[in-house]
Image (cartoon, helix red, strand yellow):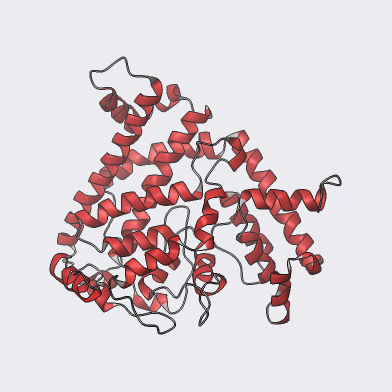
Amino acid sequence: MLTRKEIEKQEEALLAPYATKSGNTKGRLHKEKEHAYRSLYQRDRGRIVYSTAFRRLEYKTQVFVNHEGDHYRTRLTHTLEVAQIARTIARALRLNSDLVEAIALAHDLGHTPFGHAGEDTLGELMSGHGGFDHNSQGLRVVDFLEEIYPDFPGLNLTYEVREGIIKHSTPFDKPRPYIPFESDGSPSLEVQAVDVADEIAYDNHDLDDGLASGLLSEDNLNKILLWEKVSRQAKGKNHKMKKKIERSQAIRALINMQVTDILNNTEVMLKKLRIKSTRDVRNCPERIVSFSKEINSLRKPLREFLLANLYRHYRVIRMSKKASRFIRDLFNNYVTNPEQLPSSQRAKLNFEDKHKIVCDYIAGMTDRYALDEYKKFFDPYERV
């Protein structure tokens, strides 16, 4: 029978010396008895999947708000795609895939409704009250806001998963210093694997959704060398493919190309930097799990294309501006009239700053719930 102790022995025998082993964990915030047949990171993964915050990701925006269409990515589908890519990277590099999956599934738990527009607006509104970013909010969710267990708040995740949440870093996500995690140096290779997986998923799947929506033109995209290369590769000798299939195959080829580059370049970096242990990883000032210079130079025009033609498309800007108004009006309404908060939130007013309570409440909303609340407050014909 495969017990937790046997899983830990397998990790020691099979994983790379620079991988994070569950038997070497720094532990949980609250001491509790561990499971007999699951590793600590497997247990964390389960706790995340069963959390309320994880379920809410289904109705939180990636780029397109929920009512724009049923087939666009949401925070939940994006999260699952990140986890799939990150697992592939972890297994090939002999990292701890259970830890990688747990971090990937948790990395967006702190996101607001309406994507980055919601986060930016809450950041402005909370500027005098501790600020706001979704990494810190994600850690707050798993440490305090989830209510499942009778003996402690939050999910009581391991240090290593919590570190992955707070140190999550991409061009869109810049972690703030957060004690005690900053004293531990650079993030683990498992955290780094999730970060690059998030980049790959974000770019390629926004590209896919942008083309499907008609906001992006494939004629213009064909001028980008990287897209032209994978598109030609996907088409191969079959010139009778449906456009939808051809696009899907090109996206698939693009993801595969980037993952393969990550694996090859990381192997080079491990040797170049003489990484032999987790301590070597912590002491290394540069990212080890990373793209090669060649692929990065090819990715740059594609990312610039997405920025100019998708994220700054007038329809996306309109959605973002509307979302910002929804968040701002809800926030000001609750702060000015906290008696309008649900009883579960009002009960916290006795021991916590009302701005933080309102921020937590709004950040936890789905797009759909935020829109419903907005209509209840500001549409005179909507029932309250």
Q: Number of numbered discs present? A: 0
Foreground of the two, 268 or 241: 241
Kindly give the residue lying farthest to the right in the view shown. Answer: 380
Is the residue 258 above or below the residue 180 in the image?
A: above
Foreground of the two, 97 or 332: 97
Residue 208: percent from left, percent from top: 43, 34
Residue 189: percent from left, percent from top: 28, 63
> Is 78 displayed left or right of 4 in the figure?
right
Foreground of the two, 349 or 43: 43
> Is 118 displayed left or right of 95 in the figure?
right
Q: Quadrant of the C terminus?
A: bottom right
- At a point 23% along the width and 45% down the height, the residue shown is 260
- Res 187 seen here: no
Residue 377: percent from left, percent from top: 80, 53
Q: Quadrant of the N terminus?
A: bottom left
The picture quadrant where one finds residue 38 is bottom left
> Is 304 displayed left or right of 254 in the figure?
right
- At a point 17% along the width and 73% down the height, the residue shown is 9
Residue 37: percent from left, percent from top: 27, 71
Foreground of the two, 76 or 208: 76
> Is 59 displayed left or right of 17 in the figure?
right
- At a point 40% along the width and 25% down the height, the residue shown is 244
Kindly give the residue lying farthest to the top in the view shown. Answer: 240
Is the residue 350 above or below the residue 342 in the image?
A: below
